[in-house]
Image (cartoon, grey):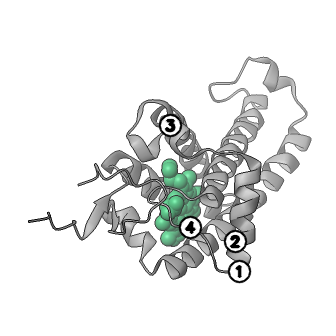
Amino acid sequence: MSEQPPSTLPVWDPLLRIFHWSLVLFYLIAYLTEDDFLALHVWAGYTVGLLIAFRLLWGLVGTRHARFSSFVTSPKTVLDYLRGMLRFRVPHYLGHNPAAAAMVVALLLSLAAVVFSGMTIIAAEGQGPLAGTWVAGLDAGWMEEIHEFLANLSLLLVFLHVGGVVFSSFVEGQNLPRAMLTGRKKYRNDYVDYTGDEK
Ligand code: HEM
């Protein structure tokens, strides 16, 4: 008798899920406290920085779908996938699809740049881990402009990211935010990156 397939498949490990929802929380705190609660803003920013550092490490040594090698792909594959999105005809992926993968990279880079630019501003005031380094000599006025620009860019990416998640949930017929909570996606045997070893 052939074995029944499972109804769901594991995809996001617990550390990745904790990373994701902590990032959402501390990103929001940092974004909403920029003017009025500077100490909280700075500590939320450091936490975002630590979370990104963890994610970079986990991208190298983490579980299968967390590893960069399993999802970072060529610009051509991303463009082909985006073209498919316009026609609502895209292959299904268990891990990040090529557009989501490009967005992960863009989000991590932009958030790292926001954190770094913020750290240079407080370094100019003699505070934070970068105080006393060459970045403390950068023009703080300029760095504030750059920091604000990058923060707004990251917000735009977040909106695109959430839009992409809604789109993919629709075309895949499943609730992807819930998958980021439970760690499991609906079973299908036509996931491009399905190996059959998933339980
Ligand atoms: C309520 C809002 C959000 C929802 C519902 C959401 C949902 C998701 C989902 C479903 C994925 C997996 C995407 C896939 O299937 O390939 C994901 C990944 C990701 N999201 Fe969000 N997200 C939200 C907000 C954010 C925010 C605010 C940030 C950054 C500040 C963010 C950063 C990321 C990153 C970096 C990943 C990649 C996960 C990894 O592999 O490390 N998300 N998100």
Instruction: Tell me whether circle 2 and circle 4 mark residues in contact (CB < 8 Å).
Output: yes
Residue 199: x %, y % from top left: 23, 55
Question: Mark 2 and mark 4: span between their CA atoms?
Answer: 8 Å
Q: Could you tell me which residue is drawn at 37 percent across and 71 percent down?
A: 178
Q: Residues within 10 Å of mark 3 (few under 14, many from 20)?
A: some
Which amino acid type is marked by label 1? Arg
Which amino acid type is marked by label 4? Pro
Q: Is mark 2 within 8 Å of ligand 1?
A: no
Which amino acid type is marked by label 3? Gly
Q: In what quadrant of the picture does the N terminus appear? A: bottom left
Looking at the image, residue 44 sits to the left or right of residue 120; the answer is left
Q: Is mark 3 within 8 Å of ligand 1?
A: yes
Sequence-first disc among 3 and 4? 3
Q: Would you name the residue on which mark 1 appears?
A: 87
Q: Would you name the residue on which mark 3 appears?
A: 59
Question: Mark 3 and mark 4: span between their CA atoms?
Answer: 23 Å
Residue nearest the viewer, comparing 11 with 144: 11
Mark number for residue 112?
none
Q: Could you tell me which residue is drawn at 42 percent across and 78 percent down?
A: 174
